[in-house]
Image (cartoon, helix red, strand yellow):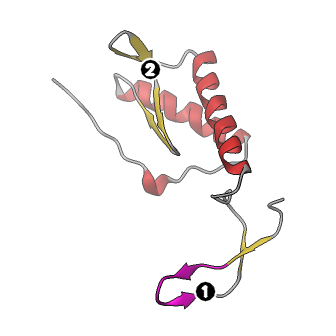
Amino acid sequence: MYGSTKAVVRVFGKGESRIFEQTRSIKQGIALSPRLFGKFVNDIVELLEKRWAPTVKLGNRTISVLLFADNMALVSRTGRELQFLIDLITKYFESKKLRLNFGKKEIMIFNK
C-alpha cells in the first residue's frame, strides 16, 4: 500500500509543491494509521515488560515509559538505566526496520 506513493505539500497562500515520491512514514489521516501506531506502541510496552526494563516508582505504579499520542518518554533513575532503555528501543526499531527521529529527542534530569 505504501510501496510507491506520491505526495504534494500545500502551503496556505503560497500554492503547492511539485509532486514527489514519499519513501518514508505512515500517512496521517487514513483509517489504518491509528491501528498501526497502536500495534507499534503495544509492542514497545510489551518489550519493556519482557526485558525487565528499569522502572521508576510514580505513586503506586512503576513505569519505564510514558506515552502520549505519537510521543514517548523513557523514564529512569540513572544515566545507565536510561542508556539501557535507549538501547532496547533502538534494537526494537532496527528489528522492525524503523528509524528514530533523533532531531526530536531531549533529555531532562530531575533532582531533589
Q: Secondary structure at mark 1?
A: loop
Q: Secondary structure at mark 2?
A: strand
Q: Nearer the viewer, residue 56 or 77?
A: 56
Above/below status of 33 relative to 24: above
Residue name at image x 64 percent, y 58 percent: 29
The quadrant where residue 75 appears: top left
Above/below status of 101 relative to 40: below
Q: Quadrant of the C terminus?
A: top left
Residue name at image x 46 percent, y 89 percent: 13
Per the image, the residue denoted by label 1 is 17
The quadrant where residue 110 appears: top left
| Disc on the earlier residue, 2 or 1 | 1
Q: Which residues are magenta?
A: 8-16
| Furthest-top residue in this view | 60
Check residue 29 in the rendering and tell me which mark sits there, or answer none.
none
Three-letter code for the amino acid on which mark 2 is drawn = Ile
Q: Quadrant of the N terminus?
A: bottom right
Is 20 displayed left or right of 10 in the figure?
right
Is 24 displayed left or right of 81 in the figure?
right
Residue name at image x 32 percent, y 13 percent: 59
Residue name at image x 72 percent, y 66 percent: 23
